[in-house]
Amino acid sequence: MPHVLVRPLDLTDDPTAAAVHRVGRAAYAVEAALIGFDGIPALRESVDEMRERPLHWIGAVAPDGAIAGFLAWEDAEDGGVCVDRLCVDPAWFRRGIASLLCARIPAGRPVTVTTGAANAPAVALYGRLGFLRGEDFEPVPGLRMASFSRNPAPWAPPNR
């Protein structure tokens, strides 16, 4: 596991917002190639549009301050968590950054997430992390999405 610190990200800070935007665009460009669809909304989103999203942002930050990856989610009306985006800088792929970030999803709440159905690395990640695959869906012609959910672990009394 690389030496990174997971911490909240403040997108009102211009350099932080620019770094998050750059990492997101790079990660989504890879996903677009994997799924054969370049219409991913985040690829066309401006920094200001990204900042306007009502999301909670955390990042995996390297010792030199570079953002290796980030996770953003919104609180769902049912009390759950809806992961809006999980992005890793391609220079940091296959180093456990996505798993590290997912471990910081708020505990004790149901979680939902979607990804391109042909994005094999993301599909495998969510499976390894205990997410159950739901129905695939096609929000626009030519884009097949996979949906995943994970319920919180039931509470169990401590062993005595």
Image (tube, grey):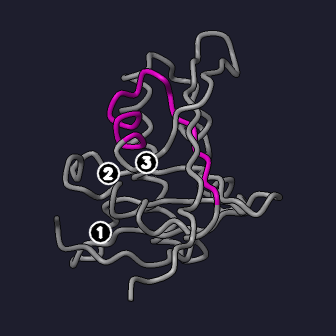
Alpha carbon separation for disc pair 1 and 2: 10 Å
Q: Nearer the viewer, residue 139 or 18?
A: 139
- Asked if the residue at tag 2 contacts the one at tag 1, i.e. Cβ–Cβ closer than 8 Å, the answer is yes
Name above or below for residue 57 compared with residue 124: below
Q: Position of residue 7 (x, y in %)?
A: 43, 78
Q: Mark 3 sits on what residue?
A: 130
Q: Position of residue 130 (x, y in %)?
A: 43, 48
Q: Mark 2 sits on what residue?
A: 89
Question: Is 128 positioned to the left or the right of 143 in the image?
Answer: left
Question: Is 143 positioned to the left or the right of 2 in the image?
Answer: right
Which residue type carries mark 2?
Asp
Q: Mark on residue 66?
A: 1
Q: Earlier in the sequence, mark 1 or mark 2?
A: 1
Alpha carbon separation for disc pair 2 and 3: 23 Å
Quadrant assignment for the N terminus: bottom left
Tell me where residue 34 sits by quadrant: top left
| Residue bounds of the magenta highlight | 110-127
What crowding class fits label 2: few (fewer than 14 Cα within 10 Å), some (14-19), or many (20 or more)?
A: many
